[in-house]
Image (tube, rainbow, N blue to C red):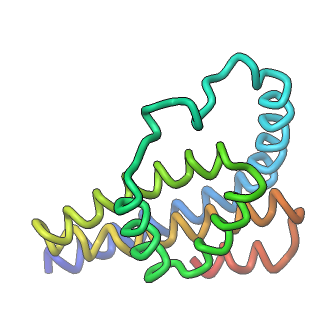
Amino acid sequence: MADFRRIRELVLFAAFGVVLVLWQLPTAVSACQDKQNENSRNSSKRSDPDQDPRYDVSPEQVAAALAFAEQHVPQIKRLLSRLETAQPSKYRTAIYSLVKETEKLQTYQGRDDERYKIMLPLWKNHKTAELILAQVTIKGENPKSREKLLEL
């Protein structure tokens, strides 16, 4: 009975997250566009991820993270390959984040299978929502994007 309650709470939490994303979608898109404009004006003030050693990850870590991500969210590889050619510094930041997230999930898999079973679907939904938001930022909002988010 306690497992059922915990699962129900997690499902409700995930559903709330999706509703929150949908509610803030128009605001998020305009905020992203505003942030891009601000970043282009202030690009000289920020540290470049290509020059910042905090973003260093080994090729083995990148390969493992990409394999894990592709296994669970196949669309991510296509987006990252586009990002790599179009905006290398954002690609490096995204890869660094992906490596850290997948390493954390894989430690759960080895130590706490129950937590892994809970965290993996949440991570997949989060990444899928991020992909849809990226598509909306690139292509503009459309009804299919809203439908995809509602399916999550």
Give the residue drawn at x 84%, y 42%.
Answer: 33
Indicate left or right for 105 with 76 as reference. left
Residue at the far top: name it. 45
Which of these two is toward me, 118 or 34?
34
- Taking 116 as reference, is 103 above or below it? above
Check the picture and name the quadrant holding the C terminus: bottom right
Whole-percent x and y of residue 97? Answer: 47, 50
Give the residue drawn at x 74%, y 48%.
Answer: 28
Quarter-wise, where is residue 53 in the image?
A: top left
Give the residue drawn at x 14%, y 80%.
Answer: 1
Whole-percent x and y of residue 23? Answer: 70, 56
Give the residue drawn at x 42%, y 68%.
Answer: 63
Q: How many marks?
A: 0
Whole-percent x and y of residue 38? Answer: 82, 28
Residue at the far left: name it. 111
Indicate left or right for 38 with 58 as reference. right
Whole-percent x and y of residue 50? Answer: 59, 37
Quarter-wise, where is residue 143 in the image?
A: bottom right
Quarter-wise, where is residue 12 in the image?
A: bottom left
Indicate left or right for 73 with 31 as reference. left
- Taking 137 as reference, is 146 above or below it? below
Which of these two is toward me, 150 or 94?
94
